[in-house]
Image (spheres, rainbow, N blue to C red):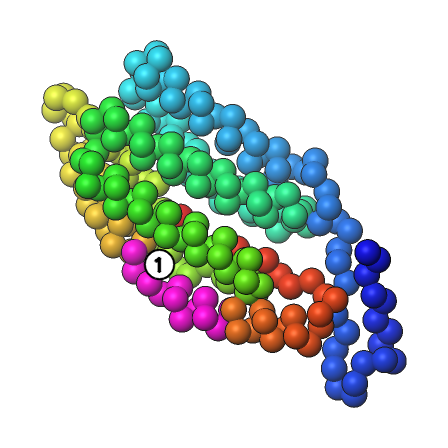
Amino acid sequence: MPEKVVNVGDLPAGEEPPPVPDPALDRIVTVPNLITLVRLVCIPLFVWLLFGAHRQTMAAILLAGLGATDWIDGFVARRYHQVSTVGKVLDPLADRVLVATAVITIIIHGAVPLWFGVATLAREAVVSAAVILLASLGARRIEVLWVGKAGTFALMFSYPAFLLSHGTARWQVPIQVVAWATGLIGLVLAWIAAGSYVPVARRALAEGRSAQASHPVGDHAPVEGMAP
C-alpha cells in the first residue's frame, strides 16, 4: 500500500511535517558494518582457541581485544556519516552475542563462578527483552546512560581477566584480584543502569506514542543504546 504524501500546506498551523527517511540508512556495505562483521566472525575463533586449541591465554587476549574495539564501529559510523539501518541492528546484536558467548564459555571453562555468570546473563536478558518490547510499542530512541557504559566496560574487562587468571601460577594472582574488583563493580553498575532505564523508558514510550499520534504516516526513531 503506497504511503500517503503529506503536503506542508495541509498541516495545521505550527505543526512540523513528519521526518523524511534518509536513503543513506538503507546502505548495507559500509566500513562500520564490516568491522562489526569481523567482530562476529572472531567469536567462533575465540571458542575454538579456548576449547579446541586449549590456548587459554590467546583466547583471553582475543576476548579483551573484541571488548576493547566495541566502540570502534559506532565511532566510525558517526564520524564518517555511515550510519545505516543494518548497522543499528547488527552492532547491538554482535555485542549481545559476544557477551553471551564469553560468559557461557568462561563458566564452562570454570574460570568464573556460576552465580556471577548467571547474574550477568540475567541482566542481559532483562535489557534485551525491554529493548524489543519498547521497540514493538513504538517508543522513541533511548540514549545510553553513563552508568550503563561504565558497567559494560568493567564487565568486558573483567571476563578476559578472569580467563587469564585461571590457573595456579603466581603471576595470575594479582590478575584475579583485578578481575574480581572490576567484575563486581561492573555487575553492580550494570544492574543500577537496568533500574535507571525504567523511568527513561516510560517517557520514551509516552513520547513515541505521542509522535505517532501526531504523524501517523511518519517513521518513529528506533529504541537503541541500552548498553550490555
Picture mark count = 1
- Does the magenta segment cover residue 86? no
Residue at screen point 32% across, 43% down:
121
Residue 177, relative to residue 153: is it above or below? above
Q: What is the magenta segment's predominant secondary structure?
A: helix
* Res 64 seen here: no
Which image quadrant is residue 130 in? bottom left
In the picture, the quarter occupied by the N terminus is bottom right
The part of the chain drawn in magenta is 191-204
The residue that label 1 is drawn on is 194
Residue at screen point 56% across, 41% down:
90
Residue at screen point 57% across, 32% down:
37
Dot 1: element: helix
In the picture as drawn, the residue positioned furthest to the top comes out as 53
Which image quadrant is residue 167 in? top left
Left or right: where 135 falls relative to 190: right
Disc 1 residue type (three-letter) = Ala
Residue at screen point 35% across, 27% down:
61
List x then y, in percent, for residue 77.
Answer: 62, 46
Left or right: where 47 falls relative to 132: left
In the picture as drawn, the residue positioned furthest to the bottom comes out as 13
